[in-house]
Image (cartoon, rainbow, N blue to C red):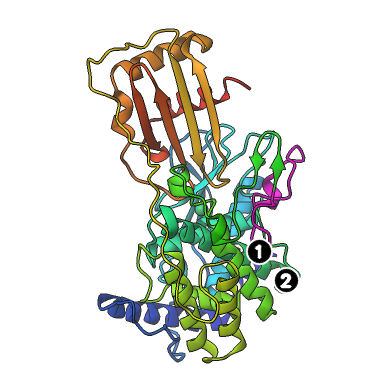
Amino acid sequence: MLQAIAESSDPVAADRAVRALERDASLRERRRGRSEAAPAPTLPPASRPAPGTPDSPQRVVSDAGKAEKLPGRVVRREGEPATGDAAADEAYDGLGATWELYATAYGRNSLDGRGLPLLASVHYGTDYDNAFWDGTQMVFGDGDGRYFQRFTASLDVIGHELTHGVTELTAGLTYRGQPGALNESISDVFGSLVRQRLLGQRADQADWLIGADLLTDAVHGVALRSLAAPGTAYDDPVLGKDPQPAHMDAFVQTADDNGGVHINSGIPNHAFYLAATAVGGYAWERVGRTWYAVLTGPGISADCDFATFARLTVDAARAQEGESSSLAEAVQSAWEQVGVLQAGSSAAPAPIAPSGQEPTGGEGSPGGEGAPGRGTEVLVRRTGGFAGLTRERSVRLEELPGDDADQWTHLLATRRLSAFSNGPIHPDAYCYEVRCDAPPTRVSMPEPRLPEEVRGLLERTLASGD
Ligand SMILES: [Zn+2]
């Protein structure tokens, strides 16, 4: 079915693609002079489709073969038949469904509005419980089989990852703190809309869940996140409880997960849900268009906080359907209900002070006291990832297999870990933290920076108590 949609040559799609190209060009013009007071974006009138304009996605799915090298071997290109490999075919279909939402609902031809090929790798790593966007492509793990199935199993997860690409190429929201949580929320919102559109669900029919299909039966929960009821998706003896707040009163200040980007996204997620269900109908049409206009419009900047985003959506809804339209009122009311805007105005409450809980980092000075030995205790903490789960283990080196203990001794004695503390942050990649008293060590490391052998050691150490 997905393939049929993707391969249909819809004459309207070509026209919309051209409009997307023109709009992006005009947005770039306007972006040069962007300011807080920039007018809400409006759609330009339709224009002639240009010959040769692509009206279908350009998909390339690769198989990483359980290694952590990208992209791996190409297994399916655009128009090729199904491979018979579930992960590869789900990725292919999911990329198509996501492309369709952006093309047909918003006139956007792929992530960049110019038909950028959609690249995905499946079977990444061994028992890898994650999916992420690395700045050029989507990456999907197979899951551990105990708690998580393959990450392509949920269509909203694929839509989520691709939307990170759209955000990176438009608003460019910083992946930390409030702009990071907005970045996450936008991916959840459009990920859910991809699924709702494919299933033909109105706002009141959708389940508003993220990752429902990738949890195994062993997990006490229905999904990883719920836009309808943040904080209720799971409550499990192993995974813990869904930590998402639905209101600013419960905003979580933390240094984990790039400042809680997968936690506080619950607040803007719930605002979208409230607005969409108040307006009714298909959520991707009216409220979805409002969110899309802000994401790709000139008013948003990389450091946009919740309140600024909220005001931009109210302005966009007014521009879309009128000052006192039901859409504008629903959007305003939704942000009030989650405590981001104050009742009766579009003014924002005072901004929350930035967290002071960042790890101070560093590994002491070389040559200090406390060379690591077999009795040395090391704490490894992993946060973030698509699921936003925290995993932590404290272990004495003598409890680990000899090779791993030796590797730890070497890493700690040479202070090599601090070399990995600064580096690129990819949406949904893991964040690792290592702490040790002797030698004094406290270092945070984003996953993409870590060599495979170091990440392997961290993962084996985390799993050593299982
Ligand atoms: Zn994400």
Q: CA distance from mark 1 to mark 2?
A: 8 Å
Q: Position of residue 222 (x, y in %)?
A: 73, 50
Judging from the image, what secondary structure is the residue with disc 2 in? loop
| The one of 135 and 118 positioned closer to us in this rendering | 135
- Please give the name of the residue rendered at 22% of the width and 15% of the height, measured from the top-left corner: 367
Q: From this view, report whether residue 388 is shown above or below residue 190.
A: above
Residue numbers of the magenta segment? 211-233
Mark 1 or 2 closer to N-term? Answer: 1
- Please give the name of the residue rendered at 60% of the width and 20% of the height, measured from the top-left corner: 465
- Please give the name of the residue rendered at 55% of the width and 42% of the height, measured from the top-left corner: 130
Q: What type of secondary structure mainly makes up the magenta span?
A: loop
Q: Position of residue 159 (x, y in %)?
A: 57, 60
Query: Is residue 26 left or right of 402 when viewed as pictured?
Result: left
Assign the N terminus to one quadrant of the image.
Answer: bottom right
The residue under label 1 is: 195
Quarter of the image for residue 112 reads bottom left
Judging from the image, what secondary structure is the residue with disc 1 in? helix
- Please give the name of the residue rendered at 64% of the width and 49% of the height, measured from the top-left corner: 224
Disc 1 and disc 2 in contact, CB within 8 angstroms = yes
| The one of 229 and 42 positioned closer to us in this rendering | 229
Quarter of the image for residue 271 reads bottom right
Question: Can residue 327 be seen here?
Answer: yes
Q: Position of residue 327 (x, y in %)?
A: 59, 84
| The one of 240 and 216 positioned closer to us in this rendering | 240
